[in-house]
């Protein structure tokens, strides 16, 4: 399934495929997918909260008429 979706290049696996492969056989390492998902989502959350002021400023500037 993975090879048909992304061409079979092992270096170009998406983050969700890598996280799914971390679980191991029979779910023996079930804490790793949660940790991997947190690490992958941490940077976008930091960027969003850091740049949130600019986002709100742009939204409010675009809504002013006149």
Image: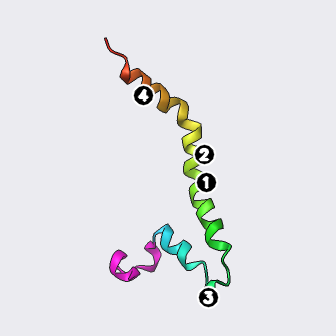
Q: Residue at x 54, y 30 (%)?
A: 53
Q: Nearer the viewer, mark 4 or mark 3?
A: 3
Location of residue 65 (image quadrant)? top left
Q: Residue furthest left?
A: 66
**Magenta stretch in the rendered image:** 1-13
Q: CA distance from mark 4 to mark 3?
A: 48 Å
Mark 4 lies on residue: 59
Q: How is the image coloured?
A: rainbow
Q: Is residue 11 above or below residue 62?
A: below
Judge whether residue 26 is colored magenta.
no
Mark 2 lies on residue: 46
At label 3, counting other C-alpha atoms closer than 10 Å, the crowd grade (few under 14, some 14-19, many 20 or more) is few
> Do the residues under discs 3 and 1 have CB atoms within 8 angstroms?
no
> Do the residues under discs 1 and 4 have CB atoms within 8 angstroms?
no
Mark 3 lies on residue: 26
Mark 1 lies on residue: 42
Q: Main secondary structure of the magenta part?
A: helix
């Amino acid at each position: 399934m993975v090879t048909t979706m992304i061409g079979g290049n092992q270096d170009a696996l998406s983050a969700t495929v890598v996280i799914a492969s971390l679980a191991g056989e029979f779910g023996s390492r079930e804490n790793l997918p949660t940790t991997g998902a947190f690490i992958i989502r941490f940077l976008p959350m930091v960027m969003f909260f850091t740049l949130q002021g600019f986002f709100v400023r742009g939204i409010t500037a675009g809504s002013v008429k006149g």
